[in-house]
Image: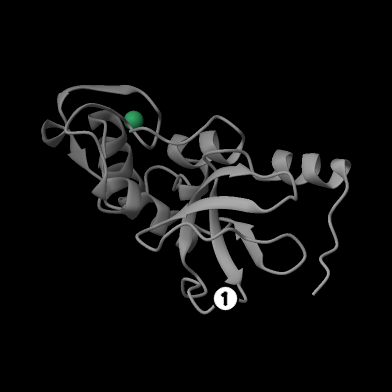
């Protein structure tokens, strides 16, 4: 089948929309080896024909072909939670960055607070805030606004917490 190649503006638009490090969810892929719909991945880059090149979470690295396959950037609290669980499994053992506020967490990560929202460690201050949120004293801070979500989604590169 003859492929229709996207023009340069399209390639640039896809690159701006899906910066390296942003998190995506697979919606559709025509490939026998494709990961299941709903699989999340981290974008590595976008190639010259506007294919998005991800590292799927434990599911290989098949590209999302422009005009054929479909994906979207994580957008819901449920999708953000899946990303945070994934980060939690790869969190640095020492001097990690708090995924909620982005601040450095000195020393061993286990010495800090376990989030009530996902299996991931956060700074003590944020641990306190979550407790206050659950007590109804503070308004709940959406997962989509955590530093580990907003920085990669907006072109700040892959989260290294
Ligand atoms: Zn924090």
**Nearer to us in this view, 72 or 14:** 14
Count of marks overlaid on the render: 1
Q: Quadrant of residue 70?
A: bottom right
Q: Residues within 10 Å of mark 1 (few under 14, many from 20)?
A: few
In the displayed structure, 47 sits above or below 78; it is above
| Left-right relation of 108 to 75 | left
At 46% from the left and 71% from the top, the residue drawn is: 35
Position in image of residue 22 (x %, y %): 55, 44
At 39% from the left and 63% from the top, the residue drawn is: 59
| Left-right relation of 67 to 22 | right
Where does the N terminus fall, quadrant-wise?
bottom right
**Nearer to us in this view, 102 or 30:** 30
Position in image of residue 104 (x %, y %): 30, 21
In the displayed structure, 94 sits above or below 133; it is above
In the rendered image, the residue lying farthest to the front is 1
Helix, strand or loop for disc 1: loop
Position in image of residue 87 (x %, y %): 33, 46
Give the color scheme: rainbow, by chain, secondary structure or one colour.
one colour
Position in image of residue 3 (x %, y %): 81, 65
Residue assigned mark 1: 31
| Left-right relation of 62 to 132 | right
Where does the C terminus fall, quadrant-wise?
top left
At 79% from the left and 44% from the top, the residue drawn is: 11
In the displayed structure, 80 sits above or below 112; it is below
**Nearer to us in this view, 31 or 123:** 31
At 53% from the left and 37% from the top, the residue drawn is: 152
């Amino acid at each position: 089948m003859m492929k229709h190649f996207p023009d340069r503006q399209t390639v640039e638009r896809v690159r701006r929309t899906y910066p390296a490090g942003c998190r995506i969810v697979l919606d559709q892929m025509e490939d026998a080896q494709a990961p299941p719909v709903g699989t999340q991945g981290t974008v590595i880059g976008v190639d010259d024909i506007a294919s998005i090149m991800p590292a799927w979470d434990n599911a290989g690295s098949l590209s999302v072909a422009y005009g054929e396959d479909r994906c979207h950037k994580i957008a819901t609290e449920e999708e953000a939670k899946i990303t945070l669980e994934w980060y939690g499994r790869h969190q640095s053992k020492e001097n990690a960055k708090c995924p909620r506020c982005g601040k450095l967490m000195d020393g061993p990560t286990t010495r800090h607070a376990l989030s009530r929202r996902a299996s991931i460690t956060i700074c003590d201050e944020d641990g306190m805030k979550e407790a206050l949120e659950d007590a109804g004293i503070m308004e709940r801070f959406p997962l989509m606004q955590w530093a580990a979500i907003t920085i990669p989604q907006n072109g700040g590169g892959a989260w290294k917490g």
